Image (cartoon, rainbow, N blue to C red):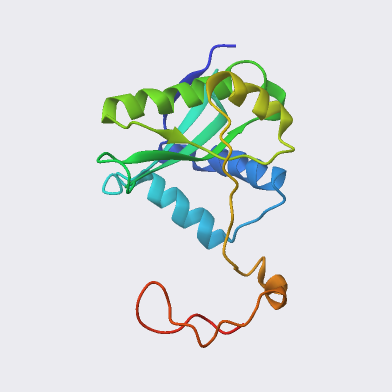
Amino acid sequence: MTVMVRPLRAEDEAEWRRLWAGYLAFYESAVSEEVYATTFARLLDPARVQQAGLVAEDAGRLVGLVHVVWHAHNWKLEDICYLQDLYVDPEVRGTGAGRALIEAVYAEADARGTPSVYWMTQDFNTQARKLYDRIGVLTPFIKYQGFDAVTAPRRHRCAKVGSQQSLMGGGHVKDY
């Protein structure tokens, strides 16, 4: 197997959708058609230099994808890179496609002078974590996430904070 990593192109849309749908299914997630279309358009938009999509291709067939987001960091002068999505077809996992995609992100980060590339994964993603343990460093950070449509049913567990002033200035913290 000879994997070539290259930027996502408009003609890749059907195969990209197949791969991203596989990624989302792995994490038991789904997005609307509007999100598929908007994400694909953003990844192709040359004016959106803060987002990029790369694909791994083998014998003319897409076998993997990676999406990255470049963003500012308050502790650094340079932007840093968040490797948001990485997916490789199950039938080609372990052949180097995932490593090739991450190495392509590292190469782009080096070209941009980006001092940091980071990503997250679920603790149960053992196959991917074997790769990540070889090419990255497991940090001690724990991720928290604010409430959204998915986590909204858990809001009743939080203390009411409706009368507190927002830390971001103006208004009040939502009363749950």
Quarter of the picture containing the C terminus is bottom right
Point out the residue furthest to the bottom here: 163
Number of disc labels: 0
Picture residue at 32% right of the left edge, 24% below the top: 110
Q: Quadrant of residue 89?
A: top right
Asked if one can make out residue 60 in the rendered structure from this viewpoint, the answer is no
Quarter of the picture containing the N terminus is top right
Q: Relative to 38, is 16 on the left or the right?
A: right
Picture residue at 46% right of the left edge, 52% below the top: 39
Is residue 117 positioned above or below 156 on the image? above
Picture residue at 41% right of the left edge, 41% below the top: 10
Asked if one can make out residue 151 in the rendered structure from this viewpoint, the answer is yes
Is residue 150 positioned above or below 88 on the image? below
Q: Nearer the viewer, residue 158 or 123?
A: 158
Picture residue at 57% right of the left edge, 40% below the top: 120
Q: Relative to 132, is 55 on the left or the right?
A: left
Q: Position of residue 68 (x, y in %)?
A: 44, 40
Q: Nearer the viewer, residue 5 or 110?
A: 110
Is residue 4 positioned above or below 27 on the image? above
Q: Quadrant of residue 69?
A: top left
Q: Position of residue 80 (x, y in %)?
A: 36, 39
